[in-house]
Image (cartoon, rainbow, N blue to C red):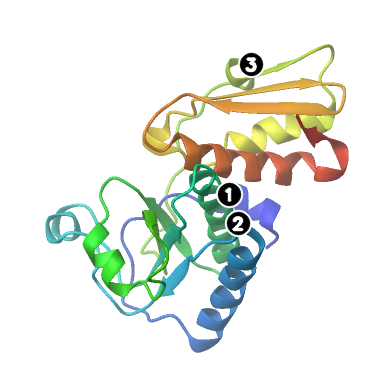
Amino acid sequence: MTLKEAMSARHTVRKYKSTPLPADVVRQLNERIDMQNREHGLSIQLVTDNTDALPGIISRTMTKGVRNYMILAGQDAPETDEKLGYSSADLMLYAQTLGLNTWWVGGMYSHKGARRNLNAPDSKKIIGVVVVGYGEEQGVAHKSKNPEAVSLYAGDPPAWFKSGVAAALLAPTAMNKQAFTIKGQDHSVTMTYEKGSFSGADLGICKYHFELGAGMENFIWK
């Protein structure tokens, strides 16, 4: 499975099997995390066989079998949320190519539990966790807006722009709001996101998806 194929296959999964992550899978995830951390100056960390990510009430009522997660951490800087969103999008899709399932958790995760397991004391910001594991099921596609509701192109939109918008609509966003706007002219593209608690992370996630769908060789961010 390619990353592009993973965009359509990936859905939020909240219930997981007790199957532990094999050592080789852990190694591959850590290598991908290291790559994202180096490229974007982040401190994302994989934690395995640990239940600290979610508060007890959430674990008992909304989910099952959560024992592995990636802590989304970095420096306390204005651009960190977007970088963490962008990197988390890559990591979720990469995990999907390894046969895993994921769940991006923002408002409901345990900040204390995540902080307790983060081996990066200099990282001042944690915005959430990405649960990862073998799902009991594969999840279902979220309800999506029409491309015309989130995008505008000056003229006849080329195929790459349409593909990018379609890919962005596959991205997970807080409360499934899909509150982004994509505008294109010639080979220039802008993307904005409605202000909110997770707007920076959502913008990064959607930008990653758009780039993967459109192909970076076809446009530049303006």
Relative placement, left or right, of 152 versus 174 is right
Q: CA distance from mark 1 to mark 2?
A: 7 Å
The mark that comes first in sequence, 3 or 2, is: 2
Mark 1, residue position: 86
Q: Residues within 10 Å of mark 3 (few under 14, many from 20)?
A: few
Is the residue 148 above or below the residue 12 in the image?
A: above
In this rendering, which labeled residue sits more in front, label 1 or label 2?
Answer: 1
* Residue type marked 3: Glu
Q: Which residue is mark 2?
A: 90
Left or right: 69 in relation to 7? left
Instruction: Label 2: state its secondary structure.
Output: helix
Nearer the observer: mark 3 or 2; the answer is 2
Q: CA distance from mark 3 to mark 2?
A: 26 Å
How many discs appear? 3
Estimate the x, y position of residue 122 in percent, counting from the top left.
Answer: 42, 67
Q: Is residue 3 visible?
A: yes
Location of residue 194 with respect to 124 vertically, above or below: above
- Of residues 39 and 215, the one drawn nearer to the viewer in this rendering: 39
Q: Amino acid at mark 1?
A: Tyr
Q: Position of residue 198 (x, y in %)?
A: 41, 38
- In the figure, is residue 111 to the left or right of 210? left
- Contact between labelled residues 2 and 3, with CB atoms less than 8 Å apart: no
Q: Nearer the viewer, residue 85 or 5?
A: 85
* Residue with the mark numbered 3: 148
Q: Is residue 65 visible?
A: no
Task: Assign the C terminus to one quadrant of the image.
Answer: top right
Quarter of the figure that contains the N terminus: bottom right
